[in-house]
Amino acid sequence: MSSRARGLLFIVSAPSGTGKTTLVEQLVERIPQLRMSRSYTSRPARKAEIDGVDYNFVTRERFEAMIAAGQFLEWAPVFDNLYGTSAADTEAMLASGDDVVLVIDVQGARKVRARGIENSAVFVMPPSKQVLEARLRLRGTDSEEQIQRRLQVAREEVASFAEYDFMVVNDELAAAVDRLHSIIVAERARLRRMRGVAESIVRTFHD
Ligand code: 5GP
């Protein structure tokens, strides 16, 4: 396969607390030429988070200036903060031939779709509301009020699964990573992407 072919764009969405970041981190470690996009956010960094690693943390003013300058492929307000994907960063990775995963919310996925940008979108579901609630409590980062708010937003988000191409239940981490892995491999093998390789093999039969 030519490493110069343009990369594929993947979207992974999941309600907060579903464990999508861990899932996607393991996925990109396992699959060569697959990279996770680093979003911009106006949210302050949490204790363990590092600027330029987990997110590009910017002020709300800077974020709004970036919106005005058309620098986002998509952006959305999530839980009182703004989150967005840099158009230039994404384009650079795709142009280099790497496949890119955007870990973005349902609104962001809709914006990418509305712009007619080709993508394969995966919705990651928690096994149930009860399991999600237990995971949010275990995480211990949210107040009771925040947990209730996340569950309310999760209820709206899970109802959007039918807008996606694939669905993965994050019941057990390793199994869920395996299923995501299969999706990436299958998308890379689509005939329209393999046509050049197939044609060059066919030509060897005519030499
Ligand atoms: P958190 O603050 O917990 O890191 O993320 C909150 C939510 O923002 C998650 O659902 C996450 O998927 C979403 N998110 C993170 N980055 C982006 C982005 O660039 N665009 C959009 N639309 N959502 C994002």
Image (cartoon, rainbow, N blue to C red):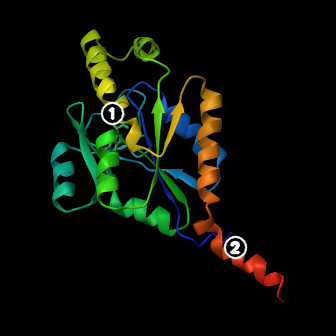
Give the residue at mark 2: 197
Residue sitting at x 47%, y 24% = 126
- Residue nearer the viewer, 148 or 127: 127
Whether the residues at callouts 2 and 1 have beta carbons within 8 Å, the answer is: no
- Residue nearer the viewer, 29 or 190: 190
Say which quarter of the image contains residue 92: bottom left
Ligand 1, image quadrant it occupies: top left
Say which quarter of the image contains residue 135: top left
Q: What residue type is labelled 2?
A: Val
Residue sitting at x 32%, y 19% = 151
Q: Residue furthest front?
A: 162
**Callout 2 secondary element:** helix
Q: As displayed, is residue 45 above or below residue 9?
A: above
Crowdedness near tag 1: few (<14), some (14–19) or many (≥20) residues, C-alpha within 10 Å: some
Mark toward the start of the polypeptide (2 vs 1): 1
Crowdedness near tag 2: few (<14), some (14–19) or many (≥20) residues, C-alpha within 10 Å: few
Q: Is residue 29 visible?
A: no
Counting from the top left corner in percent of width and height, residue 177 is at 61, 35
Quarter of the N terminus within the rendering: bottom right
Q: Is residue 182 visible?
A: yes
Q: Which amino acid does label 1 sit on?
A: Ala
Q: As displayed, is residue 9 above or below residue 152?
A: below
Mark 2–mark 1 Cα distance, whole angstroms, equals 45 Å
Q: Which residue lies furthest to the bottom in this view?
A: 207
In the image: residue 64, left or right of residue 175:
left
**Callout 1 secondary element:** loop
Counting from the top left corner in percent of width and height, residue 153 is at 28, 26
- Residue nearer the viewer, 172 or 169: 169
Give the residue at mark 1: 45
In the image: residue 139, left or right of residue 198:
left
In the image: residue 104, left or right of residue 75:
right
Q: As displayed, is residue 143 above or below residue 43?
A: above
